[in-house]
Image (cartoon, coloured by chain):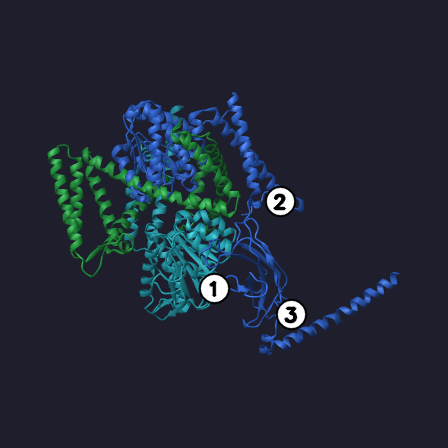
Amino acid sequence: MNIFEKMMSLDRRWVFLSLLIVCVAGYASKSETPILINDEVKSIYNFIDELPAGEIVFVAIDYDPNALAELHPMTYAVMEHCFRKDLKVIFTALSQNGPGMADLAIRDITDSLKFDRTYNGVEYKGKEIVNGVDYTFLGYKPYFAFIILGMGQDFRLQFPTDYYGTPLDSLPMMQGVLNYDDVACVIDISAGNITDAWITYGQGKYGFKLALGLTGVMAADFYPYLNSGQIFGIMGGMLGAAQYEKLADNPGLAIDGMRVQVPAHIFIIFFILMGNVGFIVSRRAKARGGN
Amino acid sequence: MRRQIPFALVFIFGTFMVFQYFVPHETSEWIYEYLLDWIAIIGIFALALGIWSFYKVSVDKIKDKNEDWPYSVISLSGLFVMIFFGFTARTGESWGFYFPALLILTAGLGMFTMAYTETSSSKSKTSAMIGLGLIVVFVIISIMDNSWNFYFYTQEGLKNIAFISFFEHIMIPIQATMFSLLAFFISSAAYRAFRARNLLSSILLIAALIVMLRFNPYLGPVSGLMADGADWLINVPNLAAKRAIIIGIGLGIVATSLKVLLGIERSYMGKG
Amino acid sequence: MRIKYSFLLALFLLLIPFSALIFGQDGAAASGETESADSLALTLPAPVTNLKAINTPNDHGHSFTVTWDISADDGGGLKNVLFYRVMRSDNPDSSFKQRGENKLPRGASTYQDNGSKRKESDDFSADFTDFYYRIDAITIDSNVFSSSGIYGPVQSKGEWYNTGRTPVLVAVIIFLILTMIFVALAKKGADLYIRPLAGIEAVDDAIGRATEMGKPILYILGLGGADQIATIASFTILSRVAKQVAEYQTKLIVPCYDPIVMTVAQDIVKSSFMDAGRVDDYKEESVYFVTQSQFAYVAAVNGTMLRELPATNMYMGKFYAESLILAETGALAGSIQISGTDEIAQIPFFVVACDYTLIGEELYAASAYLGKEPILLGSLKGQDMAKAAIIVLMIIGVVTANIGGETLENFRELFKVIN
């Protein structure tokens, strides 16, 4: 058995092991991965960046812990950008374990914004992010399609109080904020079929501006909506989050994760190519042997 | 007769569901909602059957001293401990005898399981007696101890710190681990699948490479070209093929539904 | 005569600049007024005209569709209309109340007034009861508004047929007739050819292989509920597999994700064993419930695969993210794998990791293939004919859409489904 034949019949456990080694090595090396920016991520960043202070952005955190690695960095990047721009944010979490995710993100970002920093050359003074003034977390309700439909009438129909039990009308930032008409855009960060509901029942019916943050596997399925203009941006997987972090000059978990993801991808492509080389060479050899 | 009645039921309710789609009237809505309620009710009874089936399969494994019987013990204790956590919560700051009570309850249930799985009747009797004793002790503790309580009708149990901790620190990491297995499986599957065996698979290979290289930062100027190519692949040939499959599936669903309604397709009831 | 027309035309052309001057002055007068906002706000706007309310068609009742022509001062004229308010009463003379929680923005000219159908609700709107409508055009001060005339009486009622869904009904009837024709043909003994499916033909071999090896067959019904067509199709395949398994006395393992599916599957397997005359060999424990948590289920099934090392794994039904994890583990365990799903995103994963895959509707057709009963083959043929008809219609649709024109547009409208 020559090397090419061996390559053809390589046990998959060797692939697993090599992938693990590449991942660990990538994580251990402190090299910086260059990040290219896609238009569909840039359009989300630009939209938020150009909003005047005081506008409201609606962020739907619709994922469970199993998608945490891919989607949490996205939530962090978008939230931090919004708060830095003095925008106000309304959160919902329409997947079962979503409230825990949202709660965690809010706590972390509130802590991180207390410090002075400079982003893209603009100095930012640390400040306290206050519940009810800077953000409102509406919480979780089952049957997401009905909730998305209902919020088009009035947020108070589905969420008379916020997640922490305060009536919406007694929160300063919710004064006069009725439904989607009063928010600049909706950003849905999701790992499942809730995204379909946001497009069909939300954007389709009420016509607000919608952008999506999706897991890498899902992203390809939603590009048709980008072309049809139903959504104005897509962040796909950890790469999408990394691009947003790069645009916002706020390196975080996603850019850090690129050190692992990019070598892993290259490794897989390399393996596919090697497998093909082995395949073609051994086929040629066989054909020659037959002659 | 045993099969006629189910077929009649399928026909009546199935035909109603077809009519319901075309009849917006309140009466049809009312019947529809009533039937949906029944689905929920049947589902809950079936869940009880399901849990019973799970319990029985696990206990049988322990009884037969199947090679992997310790796993069944872990499954069963997981089942009972989480149910206990979900229906109880502490009333004040201290836990009191909460965890000892839980241990005693689990031991008691374990003794009952042993009594059931034991082959010799004297040992079985002893285990049952010990189990009964432990359950009595558990009941006494739960009556005497005021630092925790049972909540069957309210959601206190879901806020029980023990319930949340088990969920967050055991369930979530295990689930995330299972999900991340995908990374390894996808890589090995891609390695084996993308071979240029013939013309079609070569096209697939090239398409796959273009989509995979789409966002690669090390490609420089080529990456824009790759991105355009990948977008075209996703939006034109890929979408066309997907739509074709979706239309086929839609028709297949209608055909299968009709076959079930008309009694042409009966094998789902075990009749060949 | 020609001179006379020319003269008139010249006069008309001359007047144009003057008319512009006149309108311009009007505009100036209007903008002059806007400067004193108070006087403007208190001026009553023109009321809406042409108010109509009808029972909303194709619904369950309790709803009216109200339409009107916007006020002359909405967007034009005094431009002082900011909102509209839809008012309703069961008495033409008094007690008009606002419908909906909010006022409508200016420019609105239609409103669907949906009342609740539940008697106990505050918003209950009774059918077959007279109601009267009025629209208020409101200025910036909500106390300054002008009301339209009153429209009524009008009654709401529920309909017994949704006309918007007629195309669906026609399609279903055509489909039904096609199926009936081909079933009748098949019964008469017509030779109906169906393309062979490798995945189906492999089922027999796979069961034979398991018997030879003395290893079990693992059958997964997917994550769908018993109401999903994919699961029903999977049930029919399970029944055939179980029958053969019973004849060969091979071990069958069916771990279930849904308790209802488990109950049905138990019954199917039992009946199949009965049909094969081996009811004593049936063990209820072979079809069991695991859990309704996706990845916990995967972990349990993977564990079973690696411990029992089944000769054959069959995945038929609805699958999601777990498809590849299951199929790759099965491949690691060295099992022959046959899969079938209508969940498009998972088909590539199965194709890669399994030996045979039924793509989309092939899963539904599988029972006809396995049974080779004329009646089932006939229905499959009917389905193919319907597919051919749809392909023809799609081509016509694409061509007409590209040609354009009103007649063709109307033709396409025939196929439109309104919910």
Mark 3 crowd level (few <14, some 14–19, many ≥20, 10 Å Cα): some
- Numbered badge on residue C402: 2
Question: Under tag 2, what secondary structure?
Answer: helix
Among the two numbered marks 3 and 2 on one chain, the one whose residue lies closer to the N terminus: 3
* Residue at mark 2: chain: C
Query: How many callouts does the rendering have?
Result: 3
Front in this rendered view, residue C189 or B68: C189
Q: What's the amino acid at mark 2? A: Asn
Q: Residue at x 75, y 72 (%)?
A: C18
- Numbered badge on residue C84: none
Q: Nearer the viewer, mark 1 or mark 2?
A: 1
| Rendered position, A62 above or below C361 | below
In the rendered image, residue B239, in percent from the top left (x then y), is placed at 49, 43
Contact between marks 1 and 3 (CB within 8 A): the answer is: no
Contact between marks 3 and 2 (CB within 8 A): the answer is: no
Hue used for the chain lettered A: cyan
Compared across the picture, whether C72 is left or right of B153 comes to right
Front in this rendered view, residue B181 or C110: C110
| Residue pointed to by mark 3 | C77
- Measure how far apart labels 1 and 2 are at the Cα level: 39 Å
Hue used for the chain lettered B: green
Question: Under tag 1, what secondary structure?
Answer: helix
Q: Say if residue A13 shows up in the picture.
A: no
Q: What's the amino acid at mark 3? A: Gly
In the rendered image, residue C397, in percent from the top left (x then y), is placed at 60, 41
Question: Can marks 1 and 3 be said to lie on one chain?
Answer: no
- Numbered badge on residue A182: 1
Compared across the picture, whether B140 is left or right of A184 comes to left
In the rendered image, residue A12, in percent from the top left (x then y), is placed at 30, 38
Query: Which chain is represented by blue in the image?
Result: C
| Res B161 quadrant in image | bottom left
